[in-house]
Image: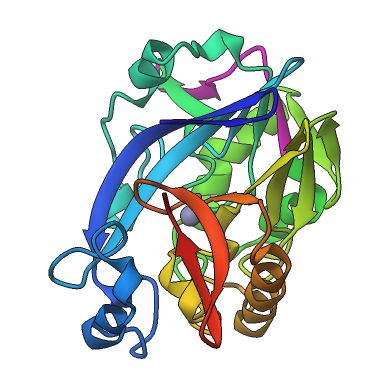
Amino acid sequence: MTWEIGDVTVTKIVEVEMSLGGEFLFDERVSVEELQKIGWLAPHFIDENGLLKISVHALIVDTPTKRILVDTCIGNDKEREIPIFANLQTKFLQDLEGAGFPRDSIDCVLCTHLHIDHVGWNTMLVDGKWVPTFPNSRYLFGKAEFEFWKQNDVDNADGHIDQKMTFKDSVQPIWEAGLVDLVDLHEQICEEVSLEPTLGHTPGHVSVRIRSNGEDALITGDFTHHPCQIAHPDWNSHVDYDAIQSTETRRAKYAELADTGTLVIGTHYATPTAGHIVRDADGYRLKVD
Ligand SMILES: [Zn+2]
């Protein structure tokens, strides 16, 4: 699955797709009945039973000067408490190579934030050791984000489940290999690609803006997990670090994006994954073609 934004091509490589009950991400407000009231969510974003369709994928942003891999999913062989993330054995790397992006061709890995399902393939297990999966790449982590998780000594509490272990096996080895560049919330990565702060889900969360030849796209990261939050910006996820700030971020971002030409590419949105935010009655919806 690919999108063209001027001279930039974005390609989605899926690691896993799943259907989950609303309670996996949200509180009791997000019931099957409430989801089914949002008519446009079916069939792409909820299934016939009202379960949320969720995708974990990486996005390759291929620009004329840099090949950037945005978010590295869950990864294989990782020891985790959360069953759906534990010890995966997927063929993600073969799929990446099959799509024309072998590991050694990636110039830059960019993590929107340092949660478990965004840093996994930063490393791979070789002879019992976690080594960088993308040896020719600089790994870009937000400065604030890195500092926060570096100091995190809490595991298995709200929003922190598996995060200590994740930092140890998927972030620390990259730092030790000298491959990390800590970046600012507004960092310009190359001519076409820059970061924008979308705080609240985590303390240093960013989205990725792509601009080329008058066209424009935004890779969301997890300031929005699921399109149901476009209809209800106040439906914060219980893995949001700051529920109030994450809600404010969604409201502000939807208002900014609505009825513009910006292609919104969701980091966990199920296929078709991208669309345009349009005003709908007193809220918004995602228009997919
Ligand atoms: Zn995520």
At horizontal 51% and vertical 85% (from top left) the residue drawn is 281
The answer to whether residue 99 is magenta is no
- Across and down, in percent, residue 71 comes to 56, 39
Nearest the viewer among 20 and 148 is: 20
Chain part drawn in magenta: 127-140
Image quarter of residue 180: top right
Q: Is residue 255 above or below residue 32?
A: above
Nearest the viewer among 278 and 22 is: 278
Apparent side of residue 227 relative to residue 60 in the rendered image (left or right): left
- Across and down, in percent, residue 88 comes to 28, 37
At horizontal 44% and vertical 67% (from top left) the residue drawn is 156
Q: Quadrant of the N terminus?
A: top left
- Across and down, in percent, residue 61 comes to 62, 28
Nearest the viewer among 139 and 193 is: 193
Image quarter of residue 170: top right
Q: Is residue 88 above or below residue 130?
A: below
At horizontal 28% and vertical 30% (from top left) the residue drawn is 90
Q: Is residue 243 above or below residue 127?
A: below
The extreme left residue here reads: 49
**Visible residue check, residue 115:** yes
Image quarter of residue 73: top left
Nearest the viewer among 9 and 138 is: 9
The answer to whether residue 131 is magenta is yes
Apparent side of residue 253 relative to residue 183 in the rendered image (left or right): left
Q: Is residue 223 above or below residue 141?
A: below
